[in-house]
Amino acid sequence: MQKTVPNARAAIAGIQSGMTLMLGGFGLCGIPEKTIAALADSDITDLTCISNNAGVDDFGLGLLLHSRQIRKMIASYVGENAEFERQMLSGDLEVDLIPQGSLAERCRAGGAGIPAFFTPAGYGTEVGEGKEVREFNGKPHILESALTADFAIVKAWRGDTDGNLIYKGTARNFNPVMAMAGRITIAEVEELVRPGELDPNQIHTPGVFVQRIFQGDGYEKRIEKRTTR
């Protein structure tokens, strides 16, 4: 299977308005910034985006919020984006906030083919309203459903043309679990090599989960909050 595509614009072929996307990253660390930029340059709208957060106002998913291409956000943390806050409070953006661990496990479960699971996180709060409750070891748990997406979009440090991926440091974050849970997974990498050049013991995402891969360049790798003295 030929998985390599020349650039982000080619990688997003087939993404249509109204689809659900998963996007890896944590803050601005490990986000698929080239693919997000390509989406921002397209006329695709009405998206449901599953991501730990929504970028910042002028970068990452903040670009799609600014252009009103996102209809719904399923996320864990959204505190660094004023445009997100404005759209949520005005009712222009539908938001489903999920405890961070539950978000990670819902994505992992989706990739593993597990339809739902019980967790104590969120019991007794708004998160648990209307959800089935069962007791395990004397503690109440709520039923959470798995998450999947039409397309999962991830960013890795190195990859090969078979789609095997290696993430670097904390940029791994949500990328591996989301790579498993997309019907079609797009991977952008800083370095693309031939099969056999990656140490198989270091591969985090096997190529079986990846359908499209390309090498980006000029990554900004912004710092979300810079502290100096």
Image (cartoon, rainbow, N blue to C red):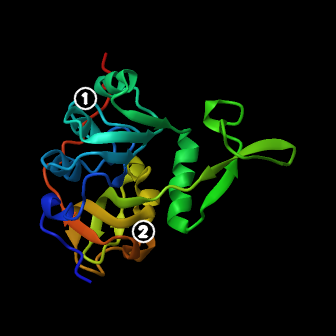
How crowded pointer 2 is (Cα within 10 Å; few <14, some 14-19, many 20+) is rated as few
Query: Which residue is rendered at x = 28% and y = 25% of the image?
Result: 83
Q: Is residue 187 left or right of residue 109?
A: left
Q: Dot 2 lies on which element?
A: helix
Measured Cα–Cα span from mark 2 to mark 1: 35 Å
Depth check, mark 2 against mark 1: the one in front is 1
Furthest residue toward right: 138
Disc 2 to disc 1: CB gap under 8 Å: no
- Residue 4 lies, with reference to residue 153, above or below; the image says below
Residue at 21% across, 32% down: 66
Q: Earlier in the sequence, mark 2 or mark 1?
A: 1
SS at mark 1 in the image: loop
The x and y percentages for residue 184 are 34, 67
**Residue behind mark 1:** 57
Q: Residues within 10 Å of mark 1 (few under 14, many from 20)?
A: some
- For disc 2, the marked residue is 202
Q: Dividing the picture into quarters, in which one does residue 160 lie?
A: bottom left
Q: Residue at x 35, y 53 (%)?
A: 21
Q: Position of residue 118 (x, y in %)?
A: 70, 51
- Callout 1 amino acid: Asp
Numbered tag placed on residue 166 in the rendering: none
Residue 114 location, x and y as percent? 60, 64
Which residue is nearer to you in this view: 175 or 13?
13
Q: Quadrant of the N terminus?
A: bottom left
Nearest the viewer among 146 and 196 is 146
- Kind of residue sitting beneath label 2: Gln
